[in-house]
Image: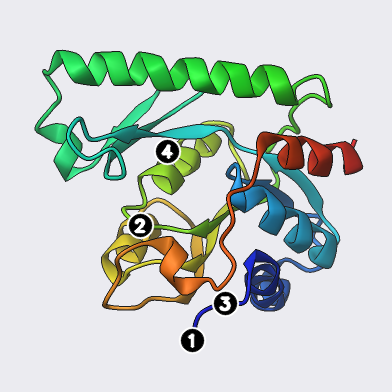
Amino acid sequence: MPFKNRQEAAEKLADILSEHYQGSNPLVLGIPRGGVIMADIIARSLGGEMDIVLVRKLRDPYQEEVAIGSVDESGSVHLNRHGERLAEDAYLEEEISRQIEVLRDRRRQYTPVRPPIEPKGRNVIIVDDGLATGSTMLAALQAVRKRDPSELCAAAAVAPPDTVASVEEKADRVVCLETPGMFMAVGQFFMDFDQVPDEEAVRILKKWG
């Protein structure tokens, strides 16, 4: 059954996550932009703190909706099997540069609100509304792992089974509500899947300032 919206999915995730993280003051990091709405709800439900983790999808040169990997703010790149075939291609270098600039622009939007919260020694939950290839979540896990959290959890409403398996290799815990075998896109599993503008993400962060 599809989720009504991101709020419903977040509330269901919070119920499951509460078994492990309620009362531990977890740091809940939303992947902009859809994951920010869900991280806000989950953090409030668990009595934790909320922030963002900035990563960007690297796009296939022929099908922009297809991810070939992802990159984080530090410039660390994760390539999936599609991206590996372009490892020596000039397009990949250009795409990485484009997406790093997007991340820098986004950080300039978010940083004036408040500085990032340090994840070292914290139980950290990274949240997105759904995972397709999982590249963005894998990049987020890689970025946060370098900052030495106590425990690192990946949480999403929906993802295909092979993607969940890939994420399980990088996270200490994975919570995913639905793992359908027939998976075309995240949006097919939500009745309301409107795009979330940057302004909404900034508004949410201001509430935590």
User: x and y percent of residue 87 in the render?
Assistant: 15, 24
Q: Which mark is residue 1?
A: 1
- Seen from the viewer's position, the closer of residues 6 and 45 is 6
Is label 2 in a helix, a strand or a loop?
loop
Alpha carbons under labels 2 and 3: distance apart: 16 Å
Residue for point 20% across, 30% down: 61
Residue type indicated by callout 4? Ala
Q: How crowded is mark 4: few (under 14 residues within 10 Å), some or many (20 or more)?
A: many
Residue type indicated by callout 2? Ala
- Seen from the viewer's position, the closer of residues 143 and 58 is 58
Is label 4 in a helix, a strand or a loop?
helix
| Residue ID for mark 3 | 3
Alpha carbons under labels 3 and 1: distance apart: 7 Å
Between tags 4 and 3, which lies in front? 3
| Residue ID for mark 4 | 139
Alpha carbons under labels 4 and 1: distance apart: 29 Å
Is label 1 in a helix, a strand or a loop?
loop
